[in-house]
Image (cartoon, rainbow, N blue to C red):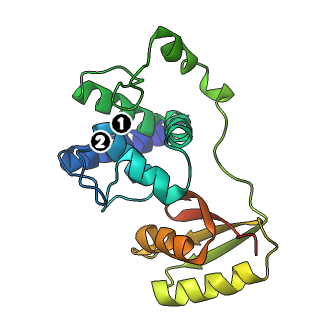
């Protein structure tokens, strides 16, 4: 990695940790439960910057079991230096380990060692899309109408990778997918992976 890449990564790390520090003390947007620093980071990673959620509410939103989502997000976070540094910052804030008891209540040495696998061996969480669409800065109303038409011509369970830079997309797209019955498999604004519903 060259000097410019190192500097960019450092800037991203500082910005992410500053953002999390400002969010400390915010409750879950849905259930008003107290959020740990790790849940705040997970919320940011899946696109809920302005409306953080606890892991239980995130798992309901994303239609995935709490444990599966927790583990998948942990692996995803550990794959990039700035997110990994933010995770370790969250652990220091809570005076906990890299596998924090707030999310892994029964974490022992055996579980700790399980997460120490080299990053190259961690499973990649990025779904492989069948089609891609860059919607640019298209606003919500226009975006979901065009998105509906694009998904209609795809086969059931095919995956569309959508790029949408509109500020409302991180909140609008999960809500629309729930209403329409499509699965938002992954959300890393400005990129979203949407699996077309069965029928």
Find disc 1 in the rendering and name its residue. Answer: 86
Res. 139 in view: no
Question: At 67% across and 74% down in the image, what residue appears?
Answer: 133
Nearer to us in this view, 66 or 125: 66
Find residue 110 and report its horizontal and vertical position in percent. Answer: 52, 11
Callout 2 environment at 10 Å: few (<14), some (14 to 19), or many (20+)?
some
Place of residue 84 in the rendered image (x, y in percent of width and height, measured from the top left):
44, 33
Of labels 2 and 1, earlier in sequence is 2
Q: Secondary structure at mark 2?
A: helix
Which residue matches tag 2? 17
Q: Is residue 112 visible?
A: yes
Quadrant showing the N terminus: top right
- Residue at image location 74% in from the left, 61% down from the top: 129
Q: How many marks?
A: 2
Q: Position of residue 106 (x, y in %)?
A: 42, 20
Looking at the rendering, which quadrant does residue 171 occupy?
Answer: bottom left
Q: Is residue 16 above or below residue 1?
A: below
- Check residue 111 in the rendering and tell me which mark sits there, or answer none: none
Seen as rendered, the residue at the extreme top is: 109
- Residue 142 image point, x, y percent: 53, 90
CB-based contact (under 8 Å), mark 2 and mark 1: yes
Above or below, comparing residue 113 to residue 57 in the picture: above
- Against 196, is 11 above or below? above
Residue drawn at x 57%, y 17% is: 114
Q: Secondary structure at mark 1?
A: helix
Q: Is residue 13 above or below residue 96?
A: below
Answer with the quarter of the image where residue 130 lies.
bottom right
Q: Residues within 10 Å of mark 1 (few under 14, many from 20)?
A: many
The quarter of the picture where the C terminus appears is bottom right
């Amino acid at each position: 990695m060259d000097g410019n890449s190192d500097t960019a990564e450092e800037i991203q790390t500082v910005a992410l940790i500053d953002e999390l520090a400002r969010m400390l003390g915010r409750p879950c947007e849905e259930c008003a439960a107290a959020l740990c620093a790790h849940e705040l980071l997970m919320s940011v990673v899946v696109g809920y910057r302005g409306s953080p959620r606890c892991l239980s509410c995130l798992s309901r939103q994303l239609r995935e079991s709490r444990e599966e989502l927790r583990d998948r997000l942990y692996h995803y976070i550990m794959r990039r230096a700035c997110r990994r540094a933010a995770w370790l910052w969250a652990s220091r804030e809570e005076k906990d380990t890299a596998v924090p008891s707030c999310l892994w209540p029964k974490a022992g040495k055996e579980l700790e060692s399980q997460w120490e696998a080299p990053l190259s061996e961690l499973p990649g969480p990025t779904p492989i899309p069948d089609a891609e669409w860059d919607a640019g800065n298209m606003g919500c109303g226009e975006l979901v109408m065009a998105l509906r038409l694009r998904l209609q011509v795809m086969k059931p369970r095919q995956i569309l990778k959508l790029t949408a830079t509109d500020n409302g997309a991180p909140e609008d797209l999960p809500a629309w997918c729930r209403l329409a019955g499509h699965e938002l498999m992954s959300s890393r604004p400005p990129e979203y992976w949407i699996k077309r519903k069965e029928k």
